[in-house]
Image (cartoon, coloured by chain):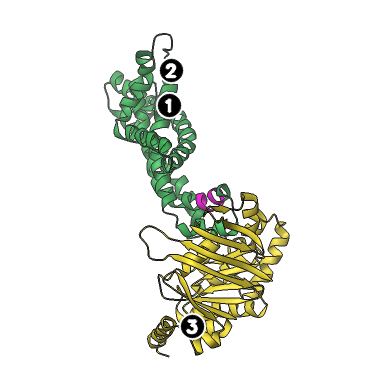
Amino acid sequence: MEILKVENLYKSFVGTEDVVTGVSFQINEGEVVALIGPSGSGKSTLLRCLTLLETIDQGSIFVAGEPMVTTSPAGVVTYAPDTALRKIRLRIGMVFQNFNLFPHFSVLRNITEAPIRVAGMAPAEAEALAHQLLAKIGLTDKADAYPYQLSGGQCQRVAIARALAMKPDILFFDEPTSALDPELTGEVLKVIRNLAAEQMTMMVVTHEMAFAREVADRVIFMDKGQIVEEGTPETLFGTPTNARTRTFLGNYNLNSGS
Amino acid sequence: MLIIEYIAPLMKQVILLGTGALTTLRIFFLTLLFSLPLGLLIALARMSPRKWLSAPVKLFILIMRGTPLILQLIFFYFAPAAILPEGLRFTLPRFSAAVLAFSLNYAAYFAEIYRGGIESIPQGQYEAAAVLGFTKSQTFFRIILPQVIKRILPPVSNEVITLVKDSALITVLGISELFRVARNEANRLFSTTPLFIAGLFYLFMNWIVTKVFDAAEKKLSYYR
């Protein structure tokens, strides 16, 4: 079953290169998709459109079959009404590059606040869920800590738990390890890897090629706002057909020294 | 015997000044009561993308910060009777005019402090809240405002300390607050002692203000 369907999505801003020009793809339930490409290729903008942080210029987005936004043949963009959008929001989670934890809340409250206030979960139930999630990310002993007391890797794991607490159908990651040093990257990737093993549907914007190759079911390569090539990690990393993909992966291998 | 002769009139003065200080405190608390929430509304209006809302508020802030408070006191007391059309003229009681002028003036300053605080909160906080499904008002009151309050405590404490001292300006409306009482006593006794005692009163009040803000900062120091 498809969780996400994107058709012919366009988004541009005044004064920035990071645009999306006609992107279509879909993600099925349980699939892990890695989105790779050079900086300014539109990956982050695409993710921000899919998570309703930006409004699109053209195109359609469906989440679990429900229209989030559609464009008529005449080119009129229509977002779903607020009540429907609120429901769709609950289906999608997002993990940011800079974690964006709430500094004034404890780790536990960072995780429970949205389930209680937004999803209407009973506080006791939300706390039980939060403790489960903390066990999952290996931070059981940090429930009462505040974000400033955590390392970057721990913060990002909490941010993942916070997103998971809303039980999303699909979880988006925007370069989840780019703000971390290599030492801390591993612990975050491990959490994502475990989620993949549990069939969590995910779309990960990443520069970690080895990780993309290992965890993703499918890899999408974007450049200049368009999807240049997509396929299984084996084909995309092993035998890329497009010249731009080859150049990008070639540069990457040189830069990362592997 | 001699000591009592010296102490007794001093005590009398302190008690007299104390009654003046009560008026000062009334002005102080009423001003905070009105200006702190009003400042937040003004800040939000000032940051509104709607020009019809932000433009007049900007002008208001300019006027309130750009003219002397003592002039504003005089204005709110005398202007309604002087410039309004016949039939609509009125005069506020002195004390109310003073509270009005102080509240509007301090609200303008607080508004700019709030604005600075609100704008210093990273965009990522709003985005994280939006993605989790918080409404705009939940985001503001539960996520943004608590962080703003922590950040603006030092500049707010500055303003509050200034307010204690600025309260002396209402003497211009003939209200018997601390400074006026002290000056009257000084004139009557032909001595500067009452003025210096008044100084100690101001100092004491601001010592308490400082303590309160220290405690508040400490209470909010559980996170960074």
Q: Which is nearer the N-term, disc 2 or disc 1? A: 2
Report whether A137 appears left or right of B87. Answer: right
Is label 3 in a helix, a strand or a loop? helix
Which label belongs to residue A33?
A: none
**Magenta stretch holds residue A19:** no
Above or below residue B160? Residue A88 is below
Alpha carbon separation for disc pair 2 and 1? 10 Å
Q: Chain of mark 2?
A: B
Q: Which residue is mark 1?
A: B100
* Residue lying at the far top of the rendered structure: B87
The extreme front residue here reads A74
Q: Which residue is mark 3?
A: A209
Q: Mark 1, mark 3: which one is toward the viewer?
A: 3
Does the CB distance between marks 2 and 1 fall below 8 Å? yes
Secondary structure type for disc 2: loop
Q: Which residues are magenta?
A: B139-146
Is residue B141 within the magenta segment? yes
- The residue marked by circle 1 belongs to what chain? B
* Label 3 Cα crowd, 10 Å radius (few <14 / some 14-19 / many 20+): some
- Mark 2 = which residue? B92
